[in-house]
Amino acid sequence: MAPRNEEFDFDFIVIGSGFGGSVSALRLVEKGYRVAVMEMGRRWTPQSLPHTSWSIHRWFWRPKFGLRGFFNMRFFRHATIFHGCAVGGGSITYAGTLLPAPEKVWTTGSWAGLSDWQAEMPNHYQTASRMLGVTQNKILWPADHLLRKAAEAAGFGRTFYSTSVGIFQPADGEAGNKSFPDPFFGGEGPPRTTCTSCGGCIMGCRYGAKNTLDLTYLYLAEKCGAQVFPETKVVNVKPLAGASDGGAGYEIRTVKSTAWIRRQPGRFTRRGVVLSASSLGTMELLFRLKDNGSLPAISGRLGKHVRTNSESLIGARMPGAEDFSQGIAIGSGVYIDEHTHVEAVRYPSGSDTMSLLTTILTDGLPGWQRIGLWLRNVLGSLLRHPLKTLRLALPWGWAREHVILLCMQALDGHIQMRWERPWFWPFRKTLVSRGKKVPTYIPRANEFARKVAQVAGGTAMSMLPEILFDVPGTAHCIGGCVIAASPDRGVVDHRQRVFGYRNMYICDGSVLGANLGVNPSLTITALAERAMSFIPPAAGAAWNDAVVRGTTAP
Ligand SMILES: Cc1cc2nc3c(=O)[nH]c(=O)nc-3n(C[C@H](O)[C@H](O)[C@H](O)COP(=O)(O)OP(=O)(O)OC[C@H]3O[C@@H](n4cnc5c(N)ncnc54)[C@H](O)[C@@H]3O)c2cc1C
């Protein structure tokens, strides 16, 4: 016999506390559900955040090696994926840029035609923007001025814009670092401090000026009674006996993510589940659960249509010039053509470790030819300007001297993730990437990097893995459990209900059905708002919400 509601530990478990997870937690608890949020990462405060990226153990996430930070980098054959891991998910490390997707994305990809997206999404974007305190960046600093000058010199200066950001900025003419009682939620939120323009957003805001989820959605969810379990990794989700489609609830197994030996296994029962572990995290968990027989009915489209936002990271380094690290992590952007968008990104002064991945800009098609060209460029530069070239290879001063150019394209291109034993470690299955590679060389973007370097008297730079291994870097891995009409096309329906299971939803970047060409967090938030809006209040819940076997029941 199925357990009664009060016999469950909670009504809903939310797995992951990033953009999708925090929205889900707040909206469900507001509807009267008992909600638990399981988060693998740690809880951070302005006091516990690292000062620079040299504090590797507090920046990087590899708990098996004692690194318990909030930033992770995963290496695949087709992409190096950067992502967050903390209470508040990617919001702790993200740059704070919050842009809606261009309208055209709703008419392409797997979600096209499933709803009147263009009519519905503006409302959800509006709610998401209000909750995340989106405002236009008022503070342009040297990196932004350089971007504008280079765009003007290249002939598309009119496309320059200052970004929309989720950052609490000082009033015009005022200095930052001033504290105020909650400015966003009518006194229900926490006190906040204005931005100091230290450029530290990506290393975690040590002033409390970035509108991270632990200060917005998740803060309010906890205030309303949601319980957050930090350092708790979900390792199994299984329908309870009596209904293999989850209609009788789910058993969830957890372990302590930061423990080496005593992993403190936990067991909980829930009526409903929201998977919000990010594109990579949700794919990894669902592949494991499909493979071990816990959730065998997950669609075979799992892992298909994984997108990197078609990104390439390039830049320019200007040793001895002004300090380019000041400002907001991403203060401005330009469109270099109708599909290609470039943003100026910075790390705070002293956070120089990323320099180890940068090298002199090199064009060309991937493979040995490009590596040969790169060696020629480096040797040529060493012979012509030995001191300058050696200086470019030194990490110290990199954040102050370097402007990263984040280039994103709205063109379609995708890879696949599979659950396989890699040839180099056949002892256990893991995520491996497959498919046609997304181009790492975008000629117009390289041309623009040269223009930026020329305007500032510096040297244009590339990412080393893009040249050596033809592997692009991306902070915007999306897709893999895409919204689609049926399980033979995707993993969830347009309300983000998992095909084949009851009361199971996915709310994170994995559901995105097209390359957005802009930073995705606002869209993930808006889609989660939309998905949660369909769930009835707890009092009237029938607990049979499903699109079992692809029927498009309302
Ligand atoms: C350096 C950097 C800068 C960025 N800047 C921007 C930006 O300016 N604008 C923008 O829009 N986007 C930006 N992004 C991308 C943005 O962070 C992601 O798109 C966004 O966080 C994805 O939201 P999500 O809800 O899918 O998952 P996430 O926010 O990644 O949250 C998922 C959470 O689930 C947890 N988790 C995973 N597996 C498990 C498990 N098994 N059990 C329990 N918990 C689990 C993870 O620890 C994580 O905290 C940036 C990313 C990086 C790395």
Image (cartoon, helix red, strand yellow):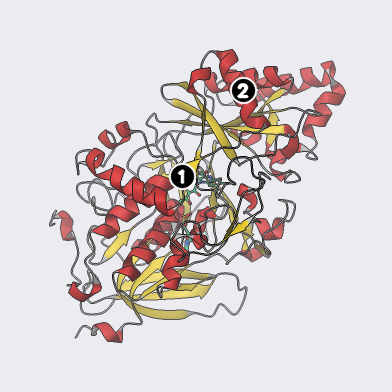
Height in image: 292 above or below 105? Answer: below
Which amino acid is tagged 1? Ser
Residue 13 tag number:
none
Secondary structure beneath label 1: strand
The residue labelled by disc 1 is 433
Residue 138 visible? The answer is yes
Q: Nearer the viewer, residue 76 or 83?
A: 83
The residue labelled by disc 2 is 449
Residue 498 visible? The answer is no
Left or right, 346 with respect to 5, comes to right
Count of all numbered marks drawn on residues in the image? 2
- Mark 1 C-beta closer than 8 Å to ligand 1: no
Left or right, 447 with respect to 35, comes to right
Q: Nearer the viewer, residue 430 or 222?
A: 222
Height in image: 104 above or below 180? Answer: above
Left or right, 224 with respect to 183, comes to left
The quadrant the C terminus occupies is bottom left
Secondary structure beneath label 2: helix
Q: Label 2, label 1: how many angstroms apart (C-alpha)? A: 29 Å
Image x and y of residue 185, in percent: 44, 60
Q: Viewer-nearest of labels 2 and 1?
A: 2
Number of residues whose C-alpha sits closer than 10 Å to that of mark 2, classed few (under 14), some (14–19) or many (20 or more): many
Image x and y of residue 286, in percent: 37, 60
Image x and y of residue 197, in percent: 66, 44
Which amino acid is tagged 2? Ala
